[in-house]
Image (cartoon, rainbow, N blue to C red):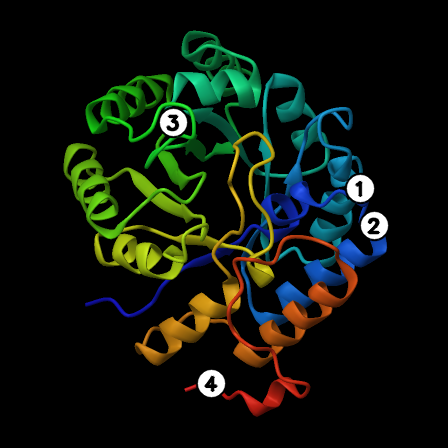
């Protein structure tokens, strides 16, 4: 079995977006620096959304440009809700973007104010307008919706098929409100990997019910190409009631290290970054469970 796993840090986007008090740009850059120093090679730098929608993201373009300039070896990417956001991301120098569509029609209306048909048309326009940009499509509420409950796997396959026809060949399947459980994660990933061979499928699991680590591990065992986490378990979805806490980067790295996986992440440096983040950001760290010691070097990497 391949014992190397690709971890993707999304704290600067999904972690920061729920924080009500604006995080100073310098602090955001410090956290990004800590994540790079810890060894992350792929980081979601933010969302290219209207500041009226999420004021926390008003400096995303500036942070993206600074990060790309300082760390050309790192893959930075950003979430975009529409064509306007895609243009802003491209102008900031990003080579990869992530549009978002919810499997749940109700959540899609709440999150991006569109029907499925309208979202698909917008994604098609983005694909045609930016043929050279890598697009990894986020699909939200795959494992459950706060409005509609558990979702149909047949509906998921149909939606992936439509997106694949548009020209999307990489997806992140998202547990937006932490409703996933191990057998549904197994069923979803085994099915999509079978039905769409050669297509990239990543996983994004919230830790709302303390199953983020377990569900992420199950997805990995079933062929997930990468796992998304946030430093300190910070974050949630502002448009999904009850979506508290992402899967903690340091918790997952600790578990994977103990299981013999090569993550490429320096655990002590990641702990130090998590400790710094918790000290300067007033947010929801409910997805974090590891006790951070006064001296991060007390915890050693196996």
**SS at mark 4?**
loop
**Mark 3 sits on what residue?**
168
Q: Which mark is residue 301?
A: 4
Are the residues at dot 1 and dot 3 in contact (C-beta closer than 8 Å)? Answer: no
Can you say whether 203 is above or below 40 in the image?
above
- Please give left or right for residue 38 compared with residue 109 in the image: right
Q: Earlier in the sequence, mark 1 or mark 3?
A: 1
Can you say whether 139 is above or below 188 in the image?
above
Can you say whether 253 is above or below 285 in the image?
below
What residue is shown at x 30% (from left), y 76% (from top)?
Answer: 259
Q: Earlier in the sequence, mark 4 or mark 2?
A: 2
Q: Earlier in the sequence, mark 3 or mark 4?
A: 3
Horizontal and vertical percent for residue 82?
A: 59, 19
Give the farthest residue toward the bottom: 298
Residue density around tag 1, few if under 14, some if 14–19, many if 20 or more, within 10 Å = few
Residue density around tag 4, few if under 14, some if 14–19, many if 20 or more, within 10 Å = few
Are the residues at dot 3 and dot 4 in contact (C-beta closer than 8 Å)? Answer: no
**SS at mark 3?**
loop
Quadrant location of residue 221? bottom left
Q: Earlier in the sequence, mark 3 or mark 2?
A: 2
Can you say whether 112 is above or below 214 in the image?
above
**Mark 2 sits on what residue?**
25
Horizontal and vertical percent for residue 260?
A: 31, 78
**SS at mark 2?**
helix
Horizontal and vertical percent for residue 95?
A: 58, 38
Are the residues at dot 3 and dot 2 in contact (C-beta closer than 8 Å)? Answer: no
Q: Earlier in the sequence, mark 4 or mark 1?
A: 1
**Mark 1 sits on what residue?**
62
């Amino acid at each position: 079995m391949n014992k190397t796993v690709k971890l993707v840090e999304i704290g600067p986007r999904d972690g920061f977006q729920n924080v009500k008090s604006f995080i100073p740009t310098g602090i955001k850059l410090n956290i990004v620096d800590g994540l790079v120093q810890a060894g992350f090679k792929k980081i979601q730098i933010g969302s290219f959304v209207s500041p009226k929608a999420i004021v926390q993201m008003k400096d995303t373009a500036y942070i993206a440009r600074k990060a790309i300039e300082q760390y050309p070896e790192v893959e930075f990417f950003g979430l975009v809700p529409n064509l306007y956001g895609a243009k802003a991301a491209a102008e900031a120098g990003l080579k990869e973007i992530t549009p978002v569509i919810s499997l749940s029609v109700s959540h899609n209306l709440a999150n991006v104010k569109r029907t499925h048909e309208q979202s698909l048309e917008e994604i098609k326009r983005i694909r045609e307008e930016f043929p050279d940009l890598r697009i990894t499509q986020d699909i939200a509420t795959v494992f459950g919706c706060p409005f509609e409950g558990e979702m149909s796997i047949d509906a998921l396959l149909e939606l992936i098929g439509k997106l694949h026809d548009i020209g999307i060949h990489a997806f992140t399947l998202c547990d937006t409100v932490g409703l996933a459980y191990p057998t549904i994660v197994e069923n979803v990933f085994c099915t999509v990997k079978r039905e769409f061979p050669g297509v990239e499928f990543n996983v994004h699991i919230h830790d709302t019910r303390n199953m983020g680590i377990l569900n992420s591990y199950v997805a990995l065992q079933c062929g997930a190409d990468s796992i998304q986490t946030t430093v300190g378990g910070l974050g949630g979805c502002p448009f999904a009631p009850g979506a508290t806490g992402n899967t903690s980067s340091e918790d997952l790295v600790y578990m994977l290290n103990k299981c013999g996986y090569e993550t490429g992440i320096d655990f002590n440096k990641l702990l130090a970054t998590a400790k710094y983040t918790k000290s300067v950001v007033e947010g929801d760290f409910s997805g974090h469970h590891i006790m951070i010691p006064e001296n991060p070097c007390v915890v050693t990497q196996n």
